[in-house]
Amino acid sequence: MAKSKNTNKSKSSSQAQSFPPGRIKIAESLKSLLEEKEFGAITTAEIAKVAGVSEALIYKYFKDKRALLYQVLKEYLDQYRMQFELDIKGIKGALNKLRKLVWTHIYVYANNRVLAKLIFLEVRSFPDYYQSETYQWVKKEYSKRLLDIIDEGIRNGEIRDDISPKFIRQVILGGIEHVCLREVIFDQEIFPDELSENLCRLIFEGIERKTAGS
């Protein structure tokens, strides 16, 4: 996903209005450390040192290091969501929007390995993630948006109405993650154009509503 300077500035401005400066510094500190090492190897002392704050301040804003991780993940995902909404403006048709979503999702995994590894390796194996505010946000903002596009396709006759929209959503999300998982784990190159084209061709063949004679 391309990151425009304007988008980043807007995000930073929004953060500044929402959170105290110390909280923002702590989150940015963890982000920079995640570029260098695995989450489990990062200590709160390191986070505080890079942020230029006391270690006690971390616990003022976050229950623990993992709660801070979930906040950082939410910020990454929110930036992705905003970019996706911008990308699909002017795109006509639910299938075209789904194609763009698949491509953008894979592109993010290809170009933001910190985010990809957080999702694949750090959060999903922890039960408390599914109780977190970040997971609730994912369900409300991202999963719901994908479901809305599928419902749009059913209403306008692009997508079959005899398959559960939620099942279609599962197949799309599961397909994206399966084709990227090995590359993320072993830090290999991901090819968004090729993977999204093949995945969309396969999924759309099953969900696209066929017209008479086709």
Image (spheres, rainbow, N blue to C red):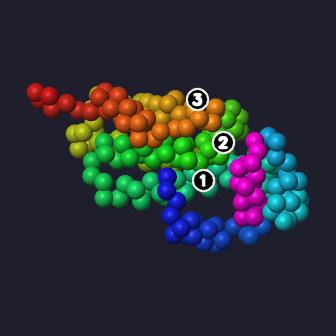
Q: Name the residue under label 2.
A: 118
| x then y, percent, for residue 155 | 26, 43
Q: What stretch is highlighted in magenta?
A: 24-38
| x then y, percent, for residue 122 | 69, 38
Q: Mark 3 points at which residue?
A: 182
Answer with mark 1 or mark 2, whichever residue precedes in sequence: 1
Q: Which amino acid does label 3 sit on?
A: Arg
Q: How far apart are marks 3 and 1 (CA)?
A: 21 Å
Using the rendered view, name the quadrant where residue 157 is placed. top left
| x then y, percent, for residue 21 | 74, 70
The numbered mark at residue 76 is 1
Which callout, 3 or 1, points to the residue nearer the camera?
A: 3
Q: Can residue 170 be spotted in the picture?
A: no
Using the rendered view, name the quadrant where residue 95 is placed. top left
Q: Which amino acid does label 2 sit on?
A: Leu
118 sits left or right of 91 in the view: right
Q: Nearer the viewer, residue 52 or 67?
A: 52
Quarter in which the C terminus is drawn:
top left
Question: Regarding mark 3 in the picture, which secondary structure is present there?
Answer: helix
Q: At 23% across and 32% down in the image, what residue appears? A: 209
| x then y, percent, for residue 163 | 33, 28
